[in-house]
Image (cartoon, helix red, strand yellow):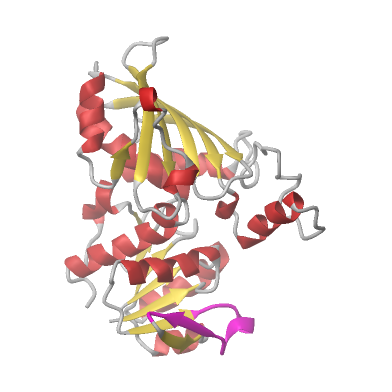
Amino acid sequence: MKVCVVGATGLVGTKMLQVLAERNFPVTALIPVASQQSIGKEIEFKGIKYPVVSYQDAIAAKPSVALFSAGGNTSLALAPLFAEAGIRVIDNSSAWRMDKDKKLVVPEVNGEVITQDDYIIANPNCSTIQLVMVLKPLHEKYAIKRVVVSTYQSVTGTGVKAVNQLLNERNNIEGEKVYPYTIDLNIIPQIDVFTDNGYTKEEMKMTNETKKIMQDNHIQLTATCVRLPVMGGHSESVNIEFAHAFDLAEVKSILQHSPGIVVMDDIEKLLYPMPLNAHDKDDVFVGRIRRDESQANTLNCWIVSDNLRKGAATNAVQIAEYLLEKHFIQ
């Protein structure tokens, strides 16, 4: 199968190539697309070198599926051109997520919403993906009323320039800055721009995307998103109020038996999720599972996942696997 990766030289694009190889997705030919300056450069995939091509050449090559991670403006401009040519697009940007005609998909949570007619499928925000992985099985059992989430997000979520800023600051090297403040030995309580209601776009993404993926507008969610000098994954402190009473042991059992989730919760052994042990893994890790003793029917937990993998590349490849399983691509 011919597979196109748009944004193949970026942080998420390179991770997509890694995940495609690791999961043995049936790639017979890779079609990498990147910026104009990168055209002609070679990208190695499974021991074979492929030249970076223009998007026009990529469309002409007629891949079955195109994985996009090149930013919202690029997706808005190019994804419809690929779709019109009969190429399925899985887009990692925010461009199509809240479009009423586009599906927003985490395969373990709502993969069944994808149909034969969907040619542009949106990959959710990284922080939303790991959150809904935990929320969905609990919502089915206890009915979620309200969620309060605070995120602790890796610099890798901003991209390679943010990683370079952190490493430069740590080594006292002058360089380009993508954050408004120093990030090393600091935390910045702002991810993306502020909106009229005082929340950032990242915080509103979590609120709106969760409702769309869970297919339930009654779930109330409020978020505070924070950038930390961390690499390896995003962490979330989550408070969940249910409509019904729950048993703590049953909650853990439900999560343990949910695909893609690893329960890491043994305080006697100081066992809990951290970016350090989530790094380069596809699972969503959950721990510090405990009852909120200040309010009835309310649970606290701590969720960690590699934002470049399940939060981006892996989820996109899993959507492609679902399309293949349903014979929507071949």
Q: Is residue 145 left or right of residue 39?
A: left
Q: Is 254 rendered above or below residue 296?
A: below
Is 310 a magenta residue? no
Give the residue at the far left of this rendering: 326
- Which residue: 71% across, 39% down? 185
Q: How many marks?
A: 0
- Whether residue 100 sits left or right of residue 71 in the image: it is left
Is 29 or 245 nearer to us in this picture? 29
Magenta-highlighted residues: 33-46
Quadrant of residue 189 within the rendered picture: top right
Between 153 and 271, the one lying in front of the other is: 271
Residue beneath the point at 47% across and 35% down: 236
Image height check: is 297 above or below 144? above
Q: Position of residue 298 (x, y in %)?
A: 35, 18
Residue 192: percent from the left, percent from the top?
Answer: 62, 47
Q: Is residue 263 above or below residue 184?
A: above
- Is 92 positioned to the left or the right of 37 in the image? left
Identified at 20% across, 39% down, the residue is 257
Q: Position of residue 193 (x, y in %)?
A: 65, 46
Residue 142 seen in the current view: no
Q: Where 20 sits versus 236, above or below?
A: below
Towards the viewer: 66 or 182? 182
- Nearer to the camera, 100 or 278: 278
Q: Position of residue 330 (x, y in %)?
A: 22, 78
Identify the image quadrant of residue 182. Answer: top right
Which residue is painted at 54% across and 70% down in the image? 74
Asked whether 45 falls inside the magenta stretch, the response is yes
Q: Quadrant of the N terminus?
A: bottom left
Q: Is residue 275 visible?
A: yes
